[in-house]
Image (cartoon, grey):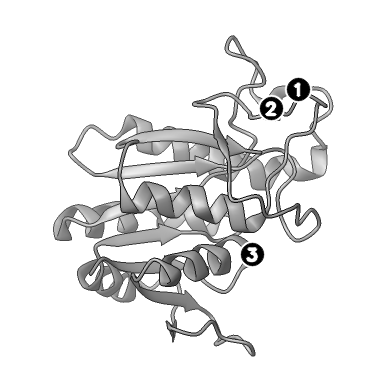
Amino acid sequence: MTKIGIWGGTGYAGAHIASEAVKRGFEVTAVARKTPEEPIDGVTYVEGAIDDVTFVDKLAADNDVVVVAIAPSKQVPSALPALVATARAHGTRLGFMGGAGSSLVSPDGPRLIDTPDFHEAWKAEAQALVDVLAALRADTSSLDWFVVSPPALFGRFAPGETTGKYRIGGDVLVVKDDGMSEISGTDFALAFVDEIAEPTHRRERFTVGH
């Protein structure tokens, strides 16, 4: 049975990934600073901090895949060296929830974060995940990693509709014919767990959307 540890397992993306993984029969441990009031059946919850190197090492040692689904913040880039080192040491695969900011708006660019309509207030958090992707791409080791970038609209503020389907856009933002770029938490989790169940994007980032 595949064992999955999820940093941010009580957040919007992390909880959906945990729920989908449990449905597939995976053994799931969700890490957060506190246990949720409404836990998901079948998920084991533990309290831990991503800046605790000893705990980071234990999570990598105990799981086949470690998912990083923490909301964009400075925590993830600063914790990346420990995440990478421990995953490499234990042969653990690393999966990241990426941001939409690094996605290209067309095959020739620019990135979404570089477009005029990208809100200035979002840039600091978006840049954190841009930096994570750049660091992973610069890694020359045999580390097994993948990044899944959501569409422009993703989160509790835009829950979307569960369709049981998704599209993949490589490095390009996934946009529907009506110009909307969105996906539900459930369908994002479907794409994420599909990659865990049947890896097809090793050492790659891919975008998803409806």
Q: From the image, which quarter does the C terminus lie in?
A: top right
Identify whether 170 is placed above or below 45. above
Identify whether 30 is placed above or below 90. below
Pointer 2 with pointer 1, Cβ within 8 A: yes
Please tell me which residue lies in front, 63 or 128. 63
Picture quarter containing residue 137? top left
Label 3, label 2: how far apart the Cα atoms are: 22 Å
> Is any part of residue 50 visible from this angle?
no
Residue at numbered disc 3? 12
* Amino acid beneath label 2: Leu
Taking 170 as reference, is 58 left or right? left
Pointer 3 with pointer 2, Cβ within 8 A: no
> Is any part of residue 123 visible from this angle?
yes
* Amino acid beneath label 3: Tyr
Q: Which mark is residue 115?
A: 1
Label 2, label 1: how far apart the Cα atoms are: 5 Å
Where residue 5 appears, as percent x and y from the top left, is 36, 69
Where residue 128 appears, as percent x and y from the top left, is 57, 45
